[in-house]
Amino acid sequence: MLDILVSGLLLSGTYALVAMGLNLQYGVARIMNLANGEVLVLGALAAFWLYTTSQVSPLLTVVLVAPVSFAGNWLIYRYLLKPLVRRSKSQGALEVDSILATFGMSFIIIGVMVSIEGGFFAYKYLSEPISIIGSTTSLNRLVAFGVAVLIGGGLYLWLNHTRAGVAVRAVSVSTEASGLVGINVPRVSALAFALGGAITAVGGALISTFITLDASIGVVFTMKALIIVIMGGVGEIRGAIVAAAILGLVETAVATLIDPGLTLAAAYLIFVLILLFRPQGLFGRRAL
Amino acid sequence: MIRRKMLGLAAAAVTASGLVFGAAAQAQDVIKLGAIAPKTGPLAGGAVVTQWPNVELWAKQVNARGGLDVGGKKMMIEVIEYDDKTNPGEHIKLAQRLAEQDKVDFVVAPYGTGFNIATAPIYGRYGYPMIAVSAITDKMDELTQRYPNLFFTLGTTTAFVEGVKEILVEQRDAGAIGNEVAMVNVADAFGIELADRARDIFGEAGFELVYDKSYPLGTPDLSPVMKGAKDSGAKAFVAWSYPPDSFGLAEQAIIEDLDVAVYYSAVATSFPAFGAAYGNKINNVLGAGGTNVDDPKVAEYRKAHEELTGKVADYWASANTYAALQILEQAIEGAGTLDRDTVTQYIKDNSFDTVMGSLSFENNVSHTFWSVGQWQDGVFRGVKGSNVDGAVPVRLKDGWAE
């Protein structure tokens, strides 16, 4: 029982790292970023590459990756996505355009990564056993969980207790109304997109310490992130965290008590149930 | 306007060079070899270790020798590569392109069991001899009867399970393990087929599967699986696993300090990256494949592989993949023609001197292969195989310390 709680919560941390970035990008900047998983794997590749070539600790890589990814995502938003935002007549049109654009982008990123390392990003960092209230787990998962808590908590405080955070939330509610009250919507959107990208890449660097990734695995993470974001409610950081927790705990419980083969089925079952009974997501607002 | 003109010129130049090239190909100074395998998608991680470097290595070596001697005429190898994105539909489209547009003379068989079976009809239709390597199945006889151009070289599902069973029986007789075995498998065609065979074969040998579970491909957290295996108390652990999970299971076994005397995980255990990632902790871990690094031929091959491709060969199918190309090479030179039917017949009728030793086909199937290997002090050595020399004794797993 304790095993389920500990393993489940740690897995939730991983899922939260995967989904928080997409939540900002989709919820605030209104970009359905299908290259989210590839950005995550890019973070993982950076950690793997720096560790295997020059023994740079992945934790240091995290610190390096965050600003680089922030800048990179800012540029992507500014030059690739903003033209789409400007010309789209409705939210639906922007979604279709951004899906196509970021889908194409995902292939470019995969191509770049394959040219750097086509095989597995296999390395080992902090895979030391550690006992938490009687349950054995690994240190690298615990570290990732800790960082997920820090990022999640930080984001929550920032969104709810700072002026910039309020602006971000306002944009996520309504771009038109935010513009009317004097919020620089394009700027806030770019900020949210870049921040989302930075969080995703940091997540990737941390996840690579305990999951062996390769250049093509991004889509798996994009799908997981999408499920969590939609379950939690688009643009709701609390929602993403709670949805990640539910998914992590349920998957671990099913794997331990019933059969590991049913984890995916269980995850999708919850997803379907939430869509059936609360289509706007756990914390989502009903569309006006 | 000027820019458009430049583009036009460039396009003309490209077309012209294409024409020149086409003319050269018609004169047949080169042998065109088509190779389609994943460079992206789920199987890419394995293909870039086992498949692609060997195509590159072989072509480089043959061309450095001045090409192949085809009926007294020296011909260079030109490789045409495509990425099938780990998508069988894509592969079939590209195979058609290789045959119709690129008009390649020969092909490298695809990577992965499913891909070899899925593409056998199309390659068969064009009459390409297809020497499959990364394909393990029990349906070889049926398939080679239906597709007479298809050859298999890496062994059957049953042979792989038998190899593991032999080790389990030996260790039970030696008193290192009991009758209890913990077994897990990845829930895809490969893992399911092996686990099904293993249930029968282990059962017949009197073993009891005290933990027998599957998990979906790409499971992010294998700790519940490993905790379950550990709680079962079995002294033998067998995983019919694929690349990302073979790493994940080893990681969890280290974390949980899985107390077993026999630890086996299937595909990717033989990858140099596996040894590099876990170092001495995975000493005495068993896995699918194996090789005999002390064989001078193998040693020479591995050295050339590293020098010419910059990558270390894996300790399993790398050598078989290279051997398949050597068979094609010797068959083309032996037949003295690029006629595909003649070359196919030559492959059926002759034996070949390869890095894997002397290989020949019995009903299109070669029975020379390694089935189980073991990491022993930084090298993955073959411990069980069929018609191969140099198997070393199995060692017991003794903890997961550095």
Image (spheres, rainbow, N blue to C red):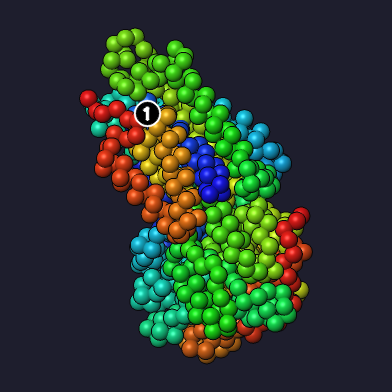
Residue A57, position in %: x, y?
A: 69, 38
Residue at 44 percent across and 85 percent down: it is: B141
Say left or right for A164 vs B170: left
Q: Residue B131: give x, y in percent of width and height.
A: 50, 76
Q: Can residue A35 be seen from the camera position used here? A: no
Residue at (50% x, 72% y) in the render: B195
* Residue A37 higher or lower than B18, as above or below: above
Q: Which residue is mark 1?
A: A235
Crowd tier of the residue under label 1, counting other residues whose Cα lies within 10 Å: few below 14, some 14–19, many 20 or above: many
For the C terminus of chain B, give its image quadrant.
bottom right
Please tell me whether residue B312 is drawn above or below residue A116 in the rendered image. below
The amino acid sitting under disc 1 is Gly
Q: Quadrant of the N terminus of chain B?
A: top left
Q: Examine the rendering and report whether any part of residue A235 can be seen.
A: yes
Q: In the orientation shown, which residue stands out farthest toward the top?
A: A182
Residue B335 in the image: state x and y as whole percent. 52, 85
Specify the quadrant of the image occupied by residue A105: top left
Q: Position of residue A121 (x, y in %)?
A: 59, 49
Chain of the residue under the numbered disc 1 shown in the image: A
User: In the figure, A180 relative to A3: above or below?
Assistant: above
- The local secondary structure at tag 1 comes to loop
Of residue B169 and residue B219, the one placed in the foreground of this image is: B169
Left of B152 or right of it: where is A22? left
